[in-house]
Image (cartoon, rainbow, N blue to C red):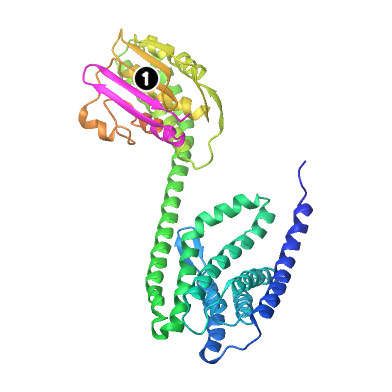
Amino acid sequence: MVASSSTFAKPLKAALVGVPALGIVLAVIAAVVGGFNVAAGWRLLLILACFAAVALAERFPVKIGPQQKINLGALPCLVAVLLLPTGLGPATAALSVLAGNRFIRRSWAESAFNAGNVLVAGALAALVGAIGPTADVARDARATLAAFVYIAVNLGLGVLPPSLHMHRPYLALLRSAALATWPATVTLAACAVTMSVLLIEAPLAALLPLVVLPMIYRMNRAIEAQAKANEQLQSVLASQRRFLTDVSHQVATPLATIMTNLSILSRANRGRPAEEAVVDSVAEAERMKRMLARLRSLAHADEDVPLRRELVDLAELTADVVRAYTAQAASSGVDLVAEVGAPARINADKDLLREAVANLVDNAVRFSPRGAQVRLSVERGSGGPVIAVADHGPGIEEERLPRLFERFQRSDSGSGLGLAIARRVVERHGGTIRVKTARGAGSTFTIELPG
């Protein structure tokens, strides 16, 4: 049974209301336990500093990866929780977050939830321990524990709305978020404790951790430049794929007309001097037709769309390829055989995988001398199925091997695309392709597929 959207809307609304309410209750408890004393002297400046720092952090989030950002607002919030009285610190942090969220025009509901999240985390951290007016190792240790309680609770509550909204398991989403952010959040917690201790014991040195801000700024600019370059590159590659597809489709129709007319001319000029020129033209048109078909295949293999995976019987796939190339092999005087040493099935895109194997067989048949044998075999390797195409052709020159699978690396005939298509298809399936060759002794291309 599929749950309706209203089934998840009620828990989501409850979370958006319940977390701020829980925060207020915990903040009151923390204030009662810790006292309502007012911060003395310079610590009152932390209130203004917290509001300003959170607003800046909300306005300028820090990038720690091309697709990943972190909000440094947790740093001033945690410093306020650790240094201000328990009746004041959590409230200061929560109100700073509320103001910062509204500053960047987040909705009232989202702003209130985020503030409530910080209030819950701050109140629990204040109950664990705060840094007192004098140096105390035990109290500093409790403050360190309080910092880690803060970031753990903050993360745990932060993934609750996304889990309810996206209908994803809470624990799975929490684990994913923790793995992605724990280095940054642990670093922020450590910096907050360090700055808090230094503000008590060595105030002039407390701002030293902030010297990393220029470096963070430069890192953000570099990440933004890299992301922009990646977007431009992806746009160019997408345009290239569209161009290949469009050209191959647009040329197919006039090419078919040319081939039809050449066939008519070939029959009309049989036995005449022009017959050889017409035959050569037909051969070139056929080669162009194959190249266009492979361009379409290459564009399809390059697409980022998910593979259309299905359970593929490799014995059936290889038998299908052999049937398709039997006539070509017979006309070339080549014996094409299939051998299945072990039955194998794999979840794969059948059409793409067949295209890869067919390209290897096509090359093997074309380059094998008359009377030779081309063997297409399926075995079970240590890591998964293995498909091998072995021929008894002239072999491949050693100097060509490093660039053999690159596009348009042509030999004496062919388009130079078949091996590039095969490699791309195999790589998209998580496999590898390699060749073993010797001059005058033929070549064996091996496709190794996972599981």
Q: Classify residue 309 by image quadrant.
A: top right
Q: Nearer the viewer, residue 389 or 29?
A: 29
Residue drawn at (47%, 25%), measured in percent from left and top?
A: 354
Relative to the observer, which residue lies in front, 131 or 178?
131
Q: Which residue is mark 1?
A: 389
Magenta span: 423-451
Residue occupying the point 72% across, 62% down: 15
Does residue 280 lie above or below 77 as drawn?
above
Point out residue 21 in the picture as x, y percentages from the top left corner.
73, 71
Secondary structure at numbered mark 1: strand
Q: Judge from the rendering whether residue 400 lies leftward or rightward of residue 419; answer left or right.
A: left
Number of marks present in the image shown: 1
Q: Residue 347 at what x, y percent from top left? A: 53, 29
Would you place residue 272 above or below residue 357 in this image? above
Residue sitting at x 55%, y 73%: 58
- Give the left or right position of residue 19, taking residue 156 as reference: right
Identity, as a three-letter code, of the amino acid under mark 1: Val
* Place of residue 71 in the rendered image (x, y in percent of width and height, measured from the top left): 52, 68
**Residue 119 visible somewhere in the drawing:** yes
Q: Quadrant of the N terminus?
A: top right
Q: Quadrant of residue 420?
A: top left
Q: Residue at x 37, y 19 (%)?
A: 389
Whether residue 251 is visible, yes or no, is: no
Magenta region includes residue 443: yes
Q: Nearer the viewer, residue 24 or 414?
A: 24
The question of residue 394 being in magenta is answered with no
Give the left or right position of residue 408, taking residue 397 as reference. right
Badge 1 crowding class, 10 Å Cα cut-off, few under 14, some 14 to 19, many 20 or more, is: many
Residue 250 sits above or below residue 107 on the image: above
Q: Position of residue 421 (x, y in %)?
A: 40, 32
